[in-house]
Image (cartoon, rainbow, N blue to C red):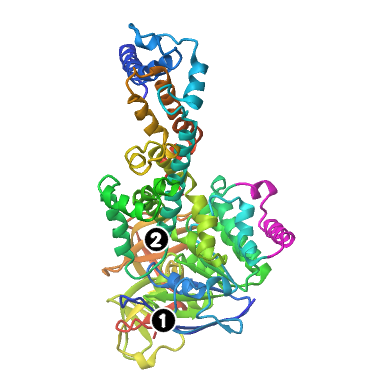
Amino acid sequence: MARVVLEGLRKTYPNGFQAIHGVDVEIEEGEFLVLVGPSGCGKSTLLRMIAGLESITEGQLSIGDRVVNNLEPSERNIAMVFQNYALYPHMSVYKNMAYGLKIMGLPKAEIEERVRKAAAILELTDEQLTRKPRQLSGGQRQRVAMGRAIVREPSVFLFDEPLSNLDAKLRVQMRLEIKTLQANLGITSIYVTHDQVEAMTLGHRLMVLNAGNVEQLGTPIELYQRPASLFVAGFIGSPAMNFADARIDAAGKNITISGQAALPLGDGGMLEHGGRDVILGIRPEHLELVADAPDAVPMTVSVVEQLGADTLVHGHFGESKSNLTVRLDGIRHIKRGETLPIRVTPDHLHVFDPKTEKRL
Amino acid sequence: MVENRPLLTLFSHIMLILGVAVIALPIWIMFVAASHPDIRMTQVPLPILPGGYFFENLDIALNRGLSGQSGQGVAHMMVNSLIMAMMIAVGKIAISLLSAFAIVYFRFPFRMFFFWMIFVTLMLPVEVRILPTYEVVANLGMLDTYWGLSIPLIASATATFMFRQVFLTIPDEMLEAARIDGAGPMRFFWDILIPMSRTNIAALFVILFIYGWNQYLWPLLITSEPQMYTVVMGIKQMLEAAEQAPEWNVIMMTALLAMLPPICVVIFMQSLFVKGLTETEK
C-alpha cells in the first residue's frame, strides 16, 4: 500500500505529439482511482507511464516515498493487469503466477504459499492451476491475470481495461469481483476504462481525460451531479445527458429552450448570467411525465425503447430540432407520434457556456 | 465438402496411387538392389523382388566399403554428415534467434540497415560466393575440419527473417508483462520467446537438417582427407570406382543409409513441424 503522487506529468512523443498535457493528482493509500475517457484520450498512456512502460517526459511520479521516474517497472512495486491478459501461453497457470516471484528469487515454499493463497482468493481450483491459459475461459484467464498481480503483493495495482475482452454478463460479474477484491486487499489501484458504468461503479474517485487533459477529478457522485464541462456531462451517465440551446432571461430567473415554455432556474436563478445564450443539459432521468402540470412542456415522441425496468422515450420539444431522451421507470405503453407533457425538475439543470464548454 | 460421386472417387484414387508409385518405385528398386549380391545386379532383367543379401550388403557398405577402394566403409561418413548437419541446423537456429531478437526488440542505431544487410545475404548463396568463402576458410585453417564444413553454411538470412516474422506476431503485452515480472532481456528471451517459438524452431530444424545433410558441393571443395568425407560425397565417389563395374548393391545400400537420418528427423518431428508451419494462434 502506498500513496501515488503525480506532479505535472507530461508525455511528448519523439515525433512531437503531446499525449499528456500535465496531470496532477494525489492518490491516497488504498484508494481506487479510475481513469476514464474515450479512446485516444491518453488514459492508457498515463497508466503505462505510471507502470514504467512509457518514459515520463516531464514531471515527477512518486510511489510511496520514492520518486520512481527512472526505475524499471519491476522496481516500482506495482502489478499490472492487461486487457488481453498477457498470460504466458506455454506456462501453466501456476507457473504464470509464480514466474515473477521466481525472478524475485523467493524460496520455493514461499512462492507455493503465495500462489495458493491468491488461488484461494480468486477461487481457482488446484486442477485449474495445472492447466494452460488457452484451456481456460475468458473470465478464468482474467482471474489468473489478477492472480499474477496479487502474488507480487504490490503497493499499487494497475488495471488496463481488464474487462473489455469479456462478454457483457461476465463483465458485470468480474466488475463486482474486482471491487470486492480491492476493498478486501486495500491496495491502491488505478484502473483505466472507457466504460463509464465501470468507472462509476468501481472508482472512489474518477479522473475524466480528454485529449490528454484532465477534464474533471472527483467522486462518481460529484461528476454526476456537477459535471465541470460539457464533455464530462455527456460522458458520465447513461443514457447520455440531453443538451439543448437555451437562453437565460434578462432577470436570470428563467431559462427558455428555443421558443418553448420558460423553465424556472433553481437556487434563486443565475443573476450574473442574465440574457445569455447557453447550453442547457438535462439528464434523461430528471425529466418526468406529469399530467396537467402548468409548467409541463409538450414533447413529440419519435422512438420508444422498452428496457423492462425503464422505458426510454426519444423525441423533441415542439418545433425544437434537438433530440431529447426521457427515462421513465417501469413499463409504459407509449406510441410513436404521441405528445407527452414533460416536466423538468428544476434542481437538476446543468448550464454550460457554449464557447468555453465549461459549467456556469 | 462432402461429395458422393463414385467415378470421381475412383479417378482420384487412381491418380493418388499413380503418384505414390512414381515416388515409391525408385526407392523400391533401391531397396531390392541393396538386397542382392553384386553379380545379380549386372544381369538383365533386373530383379523386382528383394533377395537375401541385405545384411551382408549392409555390413560391406558400413564397414568395408567397395573392394577396389581404400577399404573404408561409410560409417564414418555417416557420422561426418550427421555432425555437419547438426552443426548447421543448431548453429543457424541459434544465430538467427539471437539476431532476430536484436532486430525486433532492441532499438539501436542503424537497426534497419543491419536488417537489410542480413536480408541481402539471401541473394548470396554459397555457390555464388564459393571462391572467396573458400579463401577465407582456407586462411583460417579450417580446411578438413567440421567448422570449415559448417560455418560458411550457417551464415544466411532465411532463418533470421523467419524468426523476425514469428517474433513480430508475439503481442507487445507479453514483453511488458515480463518487464513487470522483472525479467531482463535475456531472461525474456529464454523463458518466453524461445518456448513460444518452439514449433517454429522445430520446423526450421527439420528443414535445415535436411539442407545440411544434402550438401554436396561445399564438402567436396573443402575436404581432401577421406576421414572428413560426407556420405553424399561418398555415394558419388563410389560410382567412379576404378575400372571395374559399379557395385550397385553396395551403392544402393549406401544411398538407402543416406536417406535414413532425414527420414527419421521428419518422422520424429512431424507433429511439431506441421504445427510450426501452420499454427497461427499465439
Residue type at mark 1 is: Thr
Q: Position of residue B18 (x, y in %)?
A: 32, 16
Whether residue B162 sits left or right of residue A3 in the image: it is left
Pick the residue in front: A72 or A262. Answer: A72
Q: Chain of mark 2?
A: B
Whether residue B102 sits left or right of residue A94 in the image: it is left
Residue at (34, 67) in percent of width and height:
A298
Quarter of the image where the C terminus of chain A is located: bottom left
Residue type at mark 2 is: Val
- Residues rendered magenta in the picture: A106-131
Pick the residue in front: B135 or A88. Answer: B135
Q: Position of residue A96 (x, y in %)?
A: 60, 56
Pick the residue in front: B140 or A250. Answer: B140
Give a yes or no on whether discs 1 and 2 share a subunit.
Answer: no
Label 2: how many Cα within 10 Å (few below 14, some 14–19, many 20+): some
Q: Nearer the viewer, mark 1 or mark 2?
A: 2
* Main SS class of the magenta portion in the image: helix
Q: Quadrant of residue A109?
A: bottom right
Helix, strand or loop at disc 1?
Answer: loop
Q: Is residue A87 visible?
A: no
Q: Quadrant of residue A45?
A: bottom left
Q: Residue furthest bottom?
A: A272
Q: Position of residue B242 (x, y in %)?
A: 34, 24
Pick the residue in front: A7 or A287. Answer: A7
Q: What residue is shown with label 2? A: B104
Whether residue B38 sits left or right of residue A105 in the image: it is left
**A266 relative to A73, above or below:** below
Residue A54 falls within the magenta-colored stretch: no
Whether residue B281 sits left or right of residue A261 in the image: it is right
**A249 relative to B85, above or below:** below
Q: What residue is shown with label 1? A: A57
